[in-house]
Amino acid sequence: TAPELLRNFCIIAHIDHGKSTLADRMLQLTGVVDARAMRAQYLDRMDIERERGITIKSQAVRMPWAVAGPDGATQPYALNMIDTPGHVDFTYEVSRSLAACEGAVLLVDAAQGIEAQTLANLYLAMENDLAIIPVLNKIDLPAAQPEKYAEEIAGLVGGDPADVMRVSGKTGEGVEALLDRIVDVVPAPTGDASAPARAMIFDSVYDTYRGVVTYVRVVDGHLSPRERIAMMSTRATHELLEIGVISPEPIPTSGLGVGEVGYLITGVKDVRQSKVGDTVTNAGKPATESLGGYQDPKPMVFSGLYPIDGSDYPVLRDALDRLKLNDAALLYEPETSVALGFGFRVGFLGLLHLEIVRERLEREFDLDLISTAPNVVYDVTMEDRSVITVTNPSEFPGGKIKEVREPVVKATILAPSEFIGAIMELCQTRRGDLQGMDYLSADRVEMRYTLPLAEIVFDFFDQLKSRTRGYASLDYEPSGEQVADLVKVDILLQGEQVDAFSAIVHKDKAYAYGVMMAGKLKDLIPRQQFEVPIQAAIGSRVIARETIRAIRKDVLAKCYGGDISRKRKLLEKQKEGKKRMKTIGRVDVPQEAFIAALSSE
Ligand code: GTP
């Protein structure tokens, strides 16, 4: 298709504001999917995505849409809809998807108004110079307040509130007009058709049958089947086995030219060879300059993952290898813990990423896992100037430390103004720094904070939701590091350090952490034949202590003599119970105690 007849756009929306429903409706109206074949949320492929209703992996679909030209003759346009993930953990993927478009539909629930994530993505779209089409969705809802929110949106993107489109993805009202508006407002792509090819990778997914499927947006030149292509970041070359468009299933074509969006297959088996943000060019006639913006995914949050049944370790290792094929951001290395045995230290983009990976491991590979409390990465500078990168609290050095640096984020919180006080209070307890505040409308406010990432990874979002009755929304982006007064708190059972419970916390919170953990363990660990002291310590200084009193564990005493088979059964049971115990020094700790102590409640 000639560039003049192409329109590339994405939909920016907060979770649940109806992006999938609207996308489905567009597929149906353009005839790409007929009503019978329509299953809800056609674009969300993974089961977890469908169940949780979140979009993790972007996809691109091509839709034909004919519009009458000025002379009355219909012009056959092709619209490429590029799906963007909405969550903060995947900001980098969002920014690549946006870079593949010339326009963005800003979709806002007419009963909810704009939210923090939408705002962050809107700013990204504006930085990328995309044409913005503001749209209020769900106007069929009785609770919709289109007038109010149209004003809010117009205040943000400029223009007249009356120009904010009103649609319902559910009933289809206004959706055809929206497709016409896209043709009208979104600029046609431009590029140099005779230059060496440059195509940006905005997604790459692993398919069991086909290997890696790479989604690209061609900027200059042309890519043809069977030619050799090169990845500009690594100079690796591959044969292009297949190239085409998705509409809604993959359709091979004779190539992709300027402005076109589609997929390519080279037979590689690992998404790391086809990285989001990289530039694809012709191997025979390579471009000299890449499109730029490529960035290696950087894990921000680490956690230990251990199989509950130690014999599952090889299964876990294979499962991580498999997931890695589809997730370039997933990092892991083997780790052993005194308390938990053999496992892995795994790096994630954020908490949602962690949850998704863990859930996939448990569901798709049938594993039962313990994950240790998530922590961020610290840079520790010693007195002798050496720098140690700590991804596991138990590695925190004991010697002479000069300073510890921790990652910080810029956070944006949107909420009704009545909750300003509650939000400030929460952010204060989390070492937050208020940077600014703006009113979006008379009763809604945008607050900007810098916060240590470590304070956000631990139940911040849940706290924010509960203090604002669910009305606040949050978005954050990495914003460098800061020096902080941090210490490592160790937990000792009968003088023996339990590595899984060590934590790096701010000095002012060390005492509270020690008391909380010691108290929790006292309730969770059963009495033993001897007294067991539980201590929390910073280095050699004990800051909290609890004691589990001794008990004579005599299960047979309960049986009042007599029934011998009952006694045997009890002994068997006790033996089985032992198997699920971990022994720390002389202390038997049930597996459940570890799980319960490490869970965030
Ligand atoms: P994520 O994929 O999680 O980002 O969600 P989404 O934005 O794609 O939202 P989705 O399309 O899944 O819709 C969320 C909910 O809103 C669903 O229960 C839909 O049925 C409902 N919904 C979507 N569009 C409309 C609409 O126009 N009117 C009404 N009444 N409900 C809608």
Image (cartoon, grey):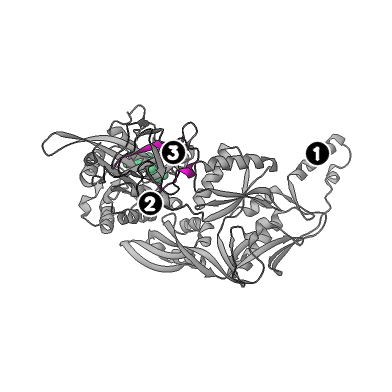
Q: Label 1, label 2: how many angstroms apart (C-alpha)?
A: 59 Å
**Residue 238 tag number:** 3
- Identify the image quadrant of residue 158: bottom left
The structure residue drawn at horizontal position 49% and vertical position 45%, both measured from the top left corner, is: 272
Quick one: 427 or 435, which is closer to the camera?
Answer: 435
Q: Label 3, label 1: how many angstroms apart (C-alpha)?
A: 60 Å
Label 3 within 8 A of ligand 1 by Cβ: no
Nearer the viewer's eye, disc 3 or disc 1?
A: 3
Q: Name the residue under label 1.
A: 572
For marks 1 and 2, the one nearer the N-term is 2
Residue 256 left/right relative to 544? left
Residue type at mark 1 is Glu
The answer to whether residue 138 shows anywhere in this view is no
**Residue 95 tag number:** 2
The picture places residue 331, in percent across and down from the top left corner, at 55, 49
Which SS class for mark 3?
Answer: strand
Q: In which quadrant will I find the C terminus?
A: bottom right
Nearer the viewer's eye, disc 1 or disc 2?
A: 2
User: Given contact means CB atoms under 8 Å apart, are the residues at marks 1 and 2 in contact?
Assistant: no
For marks 2 and 3, the one nearer the N-term is 2
Residue type at mark 2 is Ser
Q: Is the magenta stretch mostly helix, strand or loop?
A: loop
